[in-house]
Image (cartoon, grey):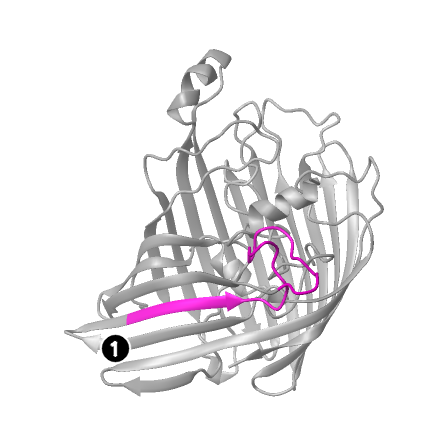
Amino acid sequence: MSTRTRLVIAVSAAMWMIPMTRAVAGIDVNAGDWKIDFSGNVNGFYVGADCGSPSTTTTVTGGLACSGDHSSSVRNGLLPAALVFSATTRQDNFDIDVTIGFYPGINSSAAGQVNLGGGSPTALATPGIDARQAFFTFGDASWGTVKIGRDIGLFGKDAILDDMTLLGMGTASGNQAPSNTSLGRIGLGYIYTDWEPQITYTTPTVNGFSASAGIFQPLDEFNQDNPLDYSRHTSPQFQAGAGYSFGDPKSGGLTGKVWVDLVTQQYQLPSTEIAAANAAGISTSHNGTGVDGGVKLDIAGFEAVLYGYTGTGVGTTGLYLDAISPGGSTRKSDGGYVQGTYKFDKLKLGLSYGISDLKLAGDETSTGNNLLKRNASTVVGLYYSLTKSVTLVGEYINSKATAQGGNSVTENDYALGGILFF
């Protein structure tokens, strides 16, 4: 199994999909005291991927640029297709909402697995359905809202929702046998926010300010070439975020938002490995903490996004992936992206550049080390609003992965297709 494939398997299981936020229109039905809404999207793209030629100098463990044969595919973009059911009501002075989201792809799945690993482009194969979203909320405008269930996280959420490739492709992961989504800018500018079981409280919005905090299901640390198993958790993961939005979109003047988020958790070796770890001088427990922040500005058709993150023991690409060295020490990681778009009439032009860096732990050396040092990409995009529901998309994507020891590989992709929201 290649390094590239191992990373795909690690990340794509319930991680590469982006939330189908409330639709542009949606289909509303009133049923007694409940208002029921159906919304979603369908998308598809032709993608050509030009991969770097495989050699001893192109191996990058954790790299997101492909090496090997060139490939063509018809596939989903960063978003899978979606059908989201939501129902809202007001009962006993509480606003109540329940949401369940189903996310099928157009690509054939492998062995019945929707997002785990590559797809299976063979005759008689079928796609699968990823039911990643199931939660309810209750609250009131006077004191806030409580969410219970599985939904998108707080850390990194705005980074991906403001990514222009959300409607397109971005880096075309696994293009020879595509699964339900591409990478977009995941791992090439931000760590993926993920879908996690959670209990989260969100404040009311007061003069543009709002904040959220919650406890989440803790995640195991996953390291592709690490025999250590940091999978024991004695406390929940904690995430929090705060933001400020300003300006009136109807005024035509400057509008925008600023935000900051935090994620932290502890992960430990199982009790069966503690004695051996102590004898070898290996840490049996670590805290993995990351912070991020950004600013988005919009004026007269021009939109700019500046985002950055940093963390220790939080990993790269996905939360707590490659966060620990084989010697049991934490690695630092950081990155971010800058993006500018300009919309005139129905056409939006976009340019985006981002990086995700992984630092070596104190017990590691770069000599001969194929571990990822940096994933980076540049995206040029054209997004044309054919109607208020249909957007046609064209993107060119250059991605490069560099290893600690100097290896590197470059991938060039182009994508043409479209997406429909309802």
In the displayed structure, 354 sits above or below 331; it is below
Residue 115 placement (x, y as % from top left):
56, 56
Towards the viewer: 143 or 249: 143
- Is 137 situated left or right of 43 in this image? left
Q: Quadrant of the N terminus?
A: top right
Residue 331 placement (x, y as % from top left):
56, 33
Towards the viewer: 211 or 363: 363
Q: Per the image, is 16 magenta?
A: no
Residue shown at the point (51%, 36%) measured from the top left: 312
- Is 149 situated left or right of 319 in this image? left
Q: Which residues are magenta?
A: 97-125
Residue 141 placement (x, y as % from top left):
25, 71
Amino acid type, mark 1: Thr
Q: Per the image, is 117 magenta?
A: yes
Residue 188 placement (x, y as % from top left):
64, 52
Residue under numbered circle 1: 89
Residue 186 in sight in this render: yes
Residue shown at the point (65%, 72%) measured from the top left: 44
Answer with the quarter of the image where residue 62 lies: top right
Q: Which secondary structure lies at badge 1?
A: strand
Towards the viewer: 78 or 310: 78
Residue shown at the point (43%, 55%) measured from the top left: 153
In the displayed structure, 311 sits above or below 336; it is above
